[in-house]
Image (spheres, rainbow, N blue to C red):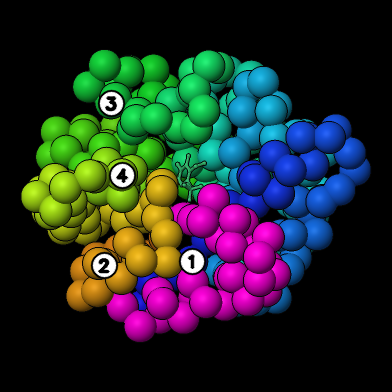
């Protein structure tokens, strides 16, 4: 059965909208765990636009399940990871001007650099995942550079505007998940997933965990974080 890791970045986005002390993603991390999340995800961006170093440091100390740190494959971020020692690092591409992570990490272009980063993290005992598009060459390269897991980018599927495009993009996800599983890598999936799109994954047993943030935090504004997480966890349990 697939798990649910909840990304609490956008609790921090709301805090930063007023540069206030609340809502605190540290509190949110505890609440999502109490609601049944299997892990807490934070993306520490280079510009610290939402999650900051203080958040990561406290969540590391208080998390009861596991902490997944999303970060760019940059030296300064590796130093942070070695200090924090998350349970998993997910390497993501990062551009300062983007609204959110727009595409997967292109391992065909950045192969050597990403491999170096993976080796550095492995040397310190940290498991690594790479956030990549559902493309067979990306999956194969992830395996070749020793990534423990892949996180398949589900954004193109979630944002598809026609049935045909949605189906095509989902087929790519299915093939990528099966290929990664076959290569004995762990398989996570995320980006843009919501309470409807998640249902499409019924029967795709190769996925270990879904990483979901925006839709859960958005729903939490209306119904509360506990209910928003429980509802998503129940949908995943039913897959
Ligand atoms: N996975 C990765 C690698 C991401 O960068 C993000 C967005 O921060 C997510 C999952 C979660 O995406 P969303 O907030 O759209 O659920």
Q: Which numbered tag is attached to residue 201?
A: 2
Work out whether mark 4 precedes mark 3 in sequence or the reverse, and give the earlier one. 3
Q: Residue at x 13, y 40 (%)?
A: 136
Q: Which residues are magenta?
A: 211-239
Q: Vertically, is 194 above or below 160?
A: below
Residue under label 3:
107
| Dot placed on the residue nearer the N-terminal end, 2 or 3 | 3
Q: Nearer the viewer, residue 200 or 92?
A: 200
**For mark 3, does the 10 Å Cα neighbourhood hold few (<14), some (14 to 19), or many (20 or more) residues?**
many
Q: Which residue is mark 1?
A: 4
Lower position in the chain sequence, tag 2 or tag 1: 1
Specify the label residue 159 is tagged with: 4
231 shown above or below 27: below
Quarter of the image with the N terminus is bottom left
Circle number at residue 193: none
Q: CA distance from mark 4 to mark 3?
A: 23 Å
Ligand 1 within 8 angstroms of badge 4 C-beta: no
For discs 2 and 3, the disc positioned in front in the rendered view: 2
Give the side of residue 51 with respect to residue 239, left or right: right
């Amino acid at each position: 059965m697939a798990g649910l890791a909840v990304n609490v970045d956008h609790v921090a986005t709301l805090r930063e909208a007023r540069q206030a002390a609340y809502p605190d993603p540290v509190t949110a991390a505890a609440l999502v765990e109490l609601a049944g999340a299997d892990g807490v995800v934070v993306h520490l961006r280079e510009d610290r636009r939402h999650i900051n170093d203080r958040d990561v440091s406290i969540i590391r100390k208080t998390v009861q399940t596991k902490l997944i740190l999303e970060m760019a494959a940059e030296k300064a971020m590796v130093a942070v990871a070695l200090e924090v020692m998350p349970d998993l690092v997910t390497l993501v591409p990062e551009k300062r001007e983007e609204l959110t992570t727009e595409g997967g990490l292109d391992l065909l272009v950045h192969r050597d650099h990403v491999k170096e980063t993976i080796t550095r993290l492995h040397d310190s005992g940290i498991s690594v995942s790479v956030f990549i598009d559902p493309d067979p060459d990306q999956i194969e390269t992830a395996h070749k550079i020793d990534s423990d897991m892949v996180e398949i980018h589900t954004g193109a599927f979630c944002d598809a505007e026609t049935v045909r495009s949605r189906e095509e993009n989902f087929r790519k996800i299915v093939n990528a998940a099966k290929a990664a599983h076959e290569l004995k890598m762990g398989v996570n999936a995320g980006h843009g997933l919501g309470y409807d799109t998640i249902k499409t994954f019924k029967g795709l047993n190769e996925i270990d965990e879904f990483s979901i943030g925006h839709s859960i935090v958005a729903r939490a504004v209306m119904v509360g974080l506990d209910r928003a997480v429980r509802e998503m966890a129940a949908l995943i349990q039913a897959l």
